[in-house]
């Protein structure tokens, strides 16, 4: 979201807090709201495909540059976007497109395969694009070889929250974090955080077990 400390960041923070509460989990919240030098989405110049070298991910040098090593090192990634006309924000679209550099690069390829992923969306009215926004992020993760985690029956594609007054479209100028009133949304966010942490642990233990069996 281009809004710092807004509803999307607030709901994402609740997801991460729930993940930490499972124990032995470190999280980091990255907001693009203060990315002043961000050059935007991928322009398909094919630098990453043909000229990429170690430590030199993309032709663009901006806030994404230090993100690449952090993304490759993480066990799980939670993407959160506000809903813009039933779709992702332009910032999230650009972020996902720029992941090409570590998915299909000459030196860095398939680096996100088997990492856990999850999606969070915040919208103004109920039934106004949450699922299409979540699915866009889920599909991107599948394209990258990641393993999307959801909340099953309570959040088939991820966690959602409404930021207007109980999803009615009403706005209280004195309360700019309406998502905190969405009790069901908060419930799905907490459940998503737990699920992401648990699946990350399961995969990490599984990888460790497989490595111990290697001759």
Image (tube, helix red, strand yellow):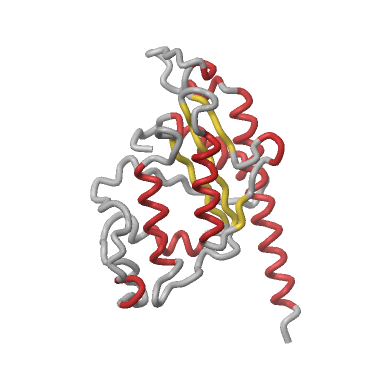
Query: With respect to residue 47, does 136 lie above or below?
Result: above
Question: In the image, 40: left or right of 15?
Answer: left
Is 131 in front, or is 159?
A: 131
Question: In the image, 159: left or right of 71?
Answer: right
Is 37 in front, or is 16?
A: 37
Q: Position of residue 199 (x, y in %)?
A: 68, 53
- Residue at (41% x, 63% y) in the render: 100
Q: Position of residue 24 (x, y in %)?
A: 64, 52
Q: Quadrant of residue 192?
A: top right
Query: With respect to residue 159, does 181 lie above or below?
Result: above
Quadrant holding the N terminus: top left
- Residue at (52% x, 39% y) in the render: 132
- Count of marks overlaid on the render: 0
- Residue at (33% x, 75% y) in the render: 52
Q: Position of residue 49 (x, y in %)?
A: 36, 73
- Residue at (61% x, 23% y) in the render: 183
Q: Quadrant of residue 208?
A: bottom right
Outermost residue, bottom side: 215
Quadrant holding the C terminus: bottom right
Question: In the image, 21: left or right of 58?
Answer: right
């Amino acid at each position: 979201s281009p809004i710092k400390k807004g509803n999307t960041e607030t709901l994402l923070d609740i997801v991460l807090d729930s993940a930490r509460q499972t124990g032995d989990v470190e999280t980091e919240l990255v907001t693009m709201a203060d990315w002043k030098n961000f050059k935007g989405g991928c322009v398909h110049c094919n630098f990453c495909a043909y000229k990429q070298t170690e430590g030199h991910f993309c032709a663009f040098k901006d806030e994404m540059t230090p993100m690449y090593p952090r993304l490759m090192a993480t066990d799980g990634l939670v993407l959160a976007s506000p809903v813009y006309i039933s779709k992702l924000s332009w910032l999230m679209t650009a972020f996902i497109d720029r992941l090409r550099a570590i998915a299909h690069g000459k030196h860095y390829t398939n680096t996100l395969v088997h990492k856990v992923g999850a999606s969070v969306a915040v919208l103004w009215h109920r039934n106004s694009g949450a699922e299409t926004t979540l699915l866009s992020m889920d599909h991107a993760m599948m394209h990258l070889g990641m393993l999307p985690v959801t909340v099953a029956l309570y959040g088939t594609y991820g966690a959602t929250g409404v930021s207007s007054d109980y999803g009615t479209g009403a706005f209280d100028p004195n309360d700019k974090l309406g998502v905190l009133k969405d009790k069901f949304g908060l419930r799905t966010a907490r459940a998503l955080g737990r699920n992401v942490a648990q699946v990350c642990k399961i995969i990490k233990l599984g990888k460790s077990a497989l490595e111990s069996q290697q001759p």
